[in-house]
Amino acid sequence: MTDFPENDKNDLINNRPRIAKTSWYKGKMPRTKAQLLAEKKAAEALIDKEEVDNQVSNREAAPAQLPSQSAMMNRHSKIKYVLAVSSGKGGVGKSMIVATLAAALQNLGLKTGILDADITGPSIPTAFNLHEHAYASALGLMPVLADNGIKIMSMNLVLENQDDPVSWRAPIINTAIKQFWTDVVWGDLDVLLIDMPPGTGDVPLTVFQALPITAAVVVTSPQMLVTTIVEKSIKLLEKLHVPLLAVVENYAYFECNNCHSKAEPFGPSKLSELAQITNAPITWQIPLLPELAQAIDKGEITSYRNDYFYNLARRIYDNLTEKYSKLVN
C-alpha cells in the first residue's frame, strides 16, 4: 500500500464522500458507508441478544408463578392453574392434544378454558366448530363458549374473516397474547390451557414471562428430528424454571382394530429417552387415532370420548392439585 504523508491522507479521505474516515496508519483499509451501516446493524443485533439474555436472567431469578414483565389478569377472572402445552415443533398435534385434553377436563367436571396463543396459526375454533365472534362488554372481552361450556379465546374469534392471514411482527403478537390475559373475562376456571406457538423464540418467551404459568406439558412424536427439536423446548423450560409436568408422545403407534397388532409408522418410541432427560412426573403415549382426526375436522371434539385422554386428564389434574395447590391464592 502506498505510504501517504499524514496531511495527504486526510485530504484524500475528506475528498471522497463515499468513503468513511478510518485509521490508515493502523494498517486498516477504508470502509464504505455500507460497511459501516452493516457493522452498526451487527452491533445492534448484539445489543438485542444481550437484552434477551437479560430477560432470560430476570425470568430465572423469579419463580414460575411470579414472572418478570408479568401481565395483570382481568379483575373478573379467577384461575387456579395455568397449563402451557408446547412442543417447540409444529406438526406434532399439539392443538389436537389441547382441544381433546380440554374436553376431557371439562367432562370430568372441571371448569376449563383455552387461550390460543398460536396467533398466526389458530386452529382451536375449528376443533370446537366455533364461527361467531368474541364480543366486548363493560367488563372486558368475553370468550366464546363451546357447546360443553369450555371458554375459548383465539385470534380467529376476533378476525373479521377467519381465513385472513395474521401477518404481524413479534411485538404486536406479544401484545395480543397479553391482551388475551388482561382483557378477557375468563371468570372462575379450574384449568386454563394455553396452546403455545411452536419454537423457542420471542413469542413463547413472552408467554412464559408475562403469564403465571403453573406448569407445562410438552408434546412430541417419535421421529428423531422432532425429538431433537423438542429437547430445545424442554431446555427452555429448564432455563426459565417452568415446571415440566408431562411429556406426551403423540402418533406413537397404530393399533389394528381386528388383530390388535401394533405398528410404528414414525419409528420406535423416544419417550423413555426423554423421560430420563426430563424426569417429568407424567409420560404418556397417544396412538394414531383416525376417529379423533375426523372429530377435529368436523368440529365435534366435545363429543369425542377416549380413555387415553380421560386418564391423562385425571393424572394431570391430580398432579396439579398435589404439587401446586399451595401456590394458588
Image (cartoon, grey):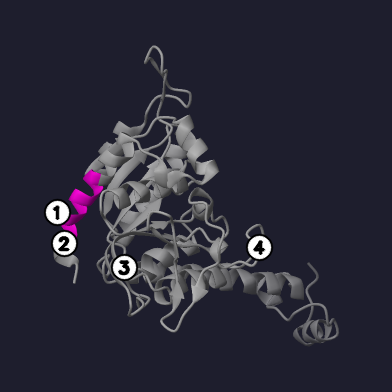
Reading the image, the residue beneath label 2 is 325
Q: Is mark 1 on a helix, strand or loop?
A: helix
Circle nearer the N terminus (3, 4): 4
Task: Give x and y (percent) for residue 312.
Answer: 28, 41
> CB atoms at circles 1 and 3 under 8 Å apart?
no
Disc 2 on helix, strand or loop? helix
Q: Which of marks 3 and 4 is in front?
A: 4
Tell me the element at label 3.
loop
On residue 212, the disc is: 3
**175 sits left or right of 100 in the view:** right
Tell me where residue 297 appears, x and y as whole percent.
Answer: 54, 42
Front-most of 173 and 128? 128
Residue at x 30% of width, y 49% of height:
107
Q: Name the residue under label 4.
A: 161
Vertical placement of residue 270 versus 242, above or below? above
Residue range of the region highlighted in magenta in the rendering: 314-324
Q: How crowded is mark 2: few (under 14 residues within 10 Å), some or many (20 or more)?
A: few
Q: Are marks 3 and 4 in contact (CB under 8 Å)?
A: no
Identify the image quadrant of residue 120: bottom right
Q: Element type at marker 4?
A: loop
Amino acid marked by disc 1: Glu
Instruction: Give the Cα separation between the discs numbered 4 and 2.
Output: 41 Å
Kindly report the distance in space between the C-alpha atoms of the residues bearing marks 3 and 4. Answer: 31 Å
* Residue position for label 1: 322
Q: In which image quadrant can residue 236 be found?
A: bottom left
On-image quarter of the N terminus: bottom right
Q: Which residue is drawn at 21% across and 44% down?
A: 281
* Earlier-in-chain disc, 1 versus 4: 4
